[in-house]
């Protein structure tokens, strides 16, 4: 039975592995909504909380790019599983998933990144990832809308696509409630441990067997209020939507430092990372004044035949860790977390949410996420914020 069928057939698809287990999920973004769905359809009594609405935070401002172009075996496995699940769950009645090749490139004179791309593709191929390198002529022939005469090398991954993050998250939250979960939006809460409790603003206390915190940039403060420190910093990123005709590919220009993907209105592009810690309760949600004009100049260089005109621009938050791997899994008895995805949280959500649910239900390791053990850090580490989408570091 496919996941898409499971969304459609209701209780007949459920098991009782979670029967008798009560779980609070704090944060109705993509990871939280997915975990809530997977827990509920295993029979757990789930309550999904959010201080705003579904996809109120970073998920609603995410780029929606999905690819499996990772050289690390675990990253590649999780990304591949996520894409497979995006495909299975998508549809006319759920959310769109559009297959679209992913291209990342380095320009002439940028030898470090060019060499890194060649090495990455070799390592990806060794992991079974469908990826190849192209020189400028091959790139121009395959993707004639992309300027290639200044490109030294490009990597091309076939296991890729894009979707609407808000629609995905809303779909999974609705599926969770359809499976029996309770959705509590516009409900700010705090957390207590030993025992696991959720405290509402009016002082009402709800007790659970387990609490899973998937509150994005707010995760650090929520846990700090419960006396738990984690090694995570929120940071601000910016993106825009522009009108034009751009059917494919999704592209990351590593030398010029920006990405773009097709969008129903033309294209979505991003850059504008600020490499310092942001305040999740007090950050500017509008893009910087110079952001759009600067980025569109670079987009027009890479897509010289496109008539690109700005529609809107905005800012959101991503989360960083000292080693650029996420914090996923059990923090203490009855308390779990998922944060620190360096901008790759949405694209991994279908797989990470599922693995988290399995871990909460008692599966040791949650299919490999023990590598992301949040207790690998003390929580008081000093570290610099580093942009999530970079070459070569993204694939190290």
Image: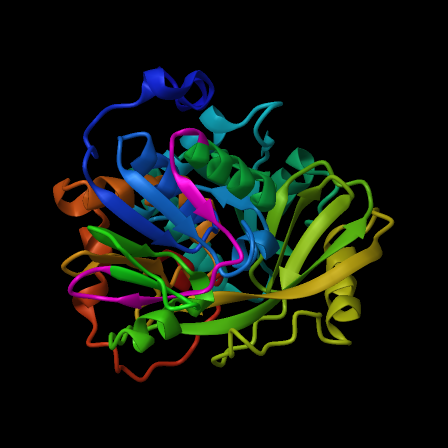
Using the rendered image of the protein, determine whether residue 250 is visible from the camera's viewpoint: yes
Task: Using the image, determine if residue 113 lies above or below residue 67.
Answer: below
Give percent across and percent down for residue 115. 44, 58
- Quadrant of residue 252 in the image? bottom right
* Left-right relation of 284 to 217: right
What residue is rendered at 42% in x and 60% in y?
215
From the viewer's side, name the closer residue of 341 and 74. Answer: 341
Instruction: Give residue 140's position: percent from left, percent from top.
Output: 68, 41
Residue 193 among magenta residues:
yes
**Left-right relation of 13 to 18:** right
Q: Quadrant of residue 296?
A: bottom right
Q: Residue at x 60, y 31 (%)?
A: 96
Q: Is residue 326 visible?
A: no
Q: Which quarter shows the C terminus?
A: bottom left
Question: In the rendered structure, does residue 157 fall within the stretch colored magenta?
Answer: no
In the rendering, at what x and y percent does residue 62 appear? 57, 54
Work out whether residue 268 or residue 364 is closer to the camera in this orientation and state it.
364
**Could you tell whether 201 is left or right of 46 in the image?**
right
In this orientation, which residue lies closer to the viewer: 268 or 33?
Answer: 33
Near-viewer residue (249 or 136): 249
Q: Which residues are magenta?
A: 178-196
* Quarter of the figure that contains the N terminus: top left
Residue in view at x 40 percent, y 80 percent: 384
Percent across and percent down for residue 114 are 49, 58
Q: Is residue 256 above or below residue 381?
A: above
Colouring used for the render: rainbow
| Tag count | 0
Q: Residue at x 69, y 51 (%)?
A: 268
């Amino acid at each position: 039975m496919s996941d898409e069928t499971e969304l459609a057939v209701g209780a007949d698809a459920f098991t009782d592995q979670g029967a008798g287990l009560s779980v609070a999920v704090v944060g109705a973004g993509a990871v939280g909504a997915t975990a809530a769905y997977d827990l509920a359809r295993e029979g757990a009594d789930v309550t999904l909380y959010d201080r705003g609405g579904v996809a109120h935070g970073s998920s609603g401002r995410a780029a929606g790019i999905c690819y499996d172009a990772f050289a690390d075996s675990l990253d590649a496995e999780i990304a591949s599983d996520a894409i497979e699940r995006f495909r299975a769950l998508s549809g006319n009645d759920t959310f769109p998933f559009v297959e679209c090749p992913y291209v990342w490139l380095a320009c002439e004179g940028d030898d470090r990144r060019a060499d890194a791309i060649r090495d990455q593709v070799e390592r990806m191929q060794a992991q079974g990832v469908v990826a190849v390198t192209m020189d400028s002529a091959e790139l121009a022939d395959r993707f004639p809308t992309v300027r290639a005469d200044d490109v030294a090398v490009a990597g091309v991954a076939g296991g890729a696509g894009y979707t609407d993050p808000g629609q995905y998250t809303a779909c999974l939250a609705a599926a969770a409630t359809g499976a029996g979960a309770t959705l509590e939006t516009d409900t700010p809460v705090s957390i207590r441990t030993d025992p696991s409790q959720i405290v509402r603003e009016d002082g009402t206390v709800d007790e659970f067997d387990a609490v899973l915190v998937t509150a994005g940039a707010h995760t650090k403060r929520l846990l700090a209020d419960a006396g738990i420190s984690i090694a995570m910093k929120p940071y601000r990123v910016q993106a825009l939507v522009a009108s034009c005709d751009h059917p494919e590919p999704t592209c990351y220009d590593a030398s010029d430092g920006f990405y773009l993907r097709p969008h129903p209105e033309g294209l979505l592009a991003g850059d504008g990372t600020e490499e310092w810690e942001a305040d999740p309760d007090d950050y500017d949600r509008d893009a910087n004044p110079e952001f759009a004009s600067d980025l569109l100049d670079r987009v027009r260089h890479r897509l010289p035949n496109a008539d690109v005109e700005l529609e809107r621009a905005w800012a959101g938050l991503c989360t960083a860790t000292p080693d650029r791997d996420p914090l996923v899994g059990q923090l203490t008895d009855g308390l779990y977390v998922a944060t620190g995805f360096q901008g790759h949280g949405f694209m991994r959500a279908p797989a990470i949410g599922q693995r988290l649910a399995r871990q909460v239900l008692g599966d040791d390791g949650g299919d490999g996420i023990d590598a992301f053990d949040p207790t690998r850090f003390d929580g008081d580490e000093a570290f610099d914020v580093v942009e999530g989408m970079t070459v070569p570091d993204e694939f190290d």
